[in-house]
Image (cartoon, rainbow, N blue to C red):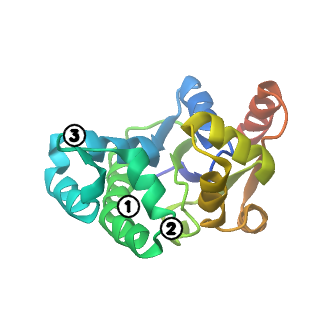
Amino acid sequence: MDSTRHIGITGNIGSGKTTVGKYLESKNFFVFDSDEFVSKIYSSTKYKDIKEKIKALFPECLKKNRLLKKCIKTIIFENAEKREKLEELIHPLVINEILKAKKKLKDKYKKKYAFYIVPLLYEKKLEYLFDEIWVVFTPPHISIKRVMKRDRIDEELAKKIMNSQINPLEKVKKADKVIINDKDINSLYSQIENLLT
């Protein structure tokens, strides 16, 4: 029997999910970050077939046969149909990777929790994959500023990305546990520690 609780971590763009994940990794918990995995799809030869399909979907985002992720991001938040097609290509791979990780950890992993960071967990109705869901919440105006700085994008695109996701307060209502990330880093770490006890 699998005694580990598999925790899905979600929250809107710029809420601090990656920071939470890095802290949990520093405590030697298993952490799967779906954004990191998607980056591998773009860079690894293992996913050549999927990359060819993405190239066919976004020919305008090719430079010397390399996909420009910022170009794709700009298009998908202007074009819902292309966004859905891209998600149809990528999400089955993400789900499969989560299932593989859970199977691999069974009987070998001795910690109480394993964590999976999935930004569109609620949007894609992936609750069934996890024993519990933690939502990282940051007020949208703070998230938008963070995203603009991190991704070097303008406010309009940052807001479009935010608006394409379920309202952050709706995610809070659905969550089993909530981490509020609107203060300093020590406040964030302290909340994580409280949830781990």
Pick whichever of labels 2 and 1 is earlier in the sequence: 1
**Residue 12 visible in rendering:** no
- Disc 2 residue type? Leu
For numbered disc 1, what is the local secondary structure? Answer: helix
Say which residue label 1 marks: 95
Pick whichever of labels 2 and 3 is earlier in the sequence: 3
Say which residue label 3 marks: 44
Say which residue label 2 marks: 126
For numbered disc 3, what is the local secondary structure? Answer: loop
Q: Quadrant of residue 92?
A: bottom left
Left or right of 32 on screen, residue 160: right
Which quadrant of the figure contains the C terminus? Answer: top right
Q: Position of residue 4 (x, y in %)?
A: 52, 47
The residue under the point 59% across, 32% down is 24
Of residues 12 and 76, the one drawn nearer to the viewer in this rendering: 76
Which quadrant of the figure contains the N terminus? Answer: bottom left
Few, some or many C-alpha atoms within 10 Å of disc 3 (few <14, some 14-19, many ≥20)? few
Of residues 74 and 13, the one drawn nearer to the viewer in this rendering: 74
Observer-side mark, 2 or 3, equals 3
Asked if labels 1 and 3 touch by Cβ distance under 8 angstroms, the answer is: no
Asked if labels 3 and 2 touch by Cβ distance under 8 angstroms, the answer is: no
Pick whichever of labels 3 and 1 is earlier in the sequence: 3
- The correct choice, above or below, for 65 with respect to 83 in the image is above
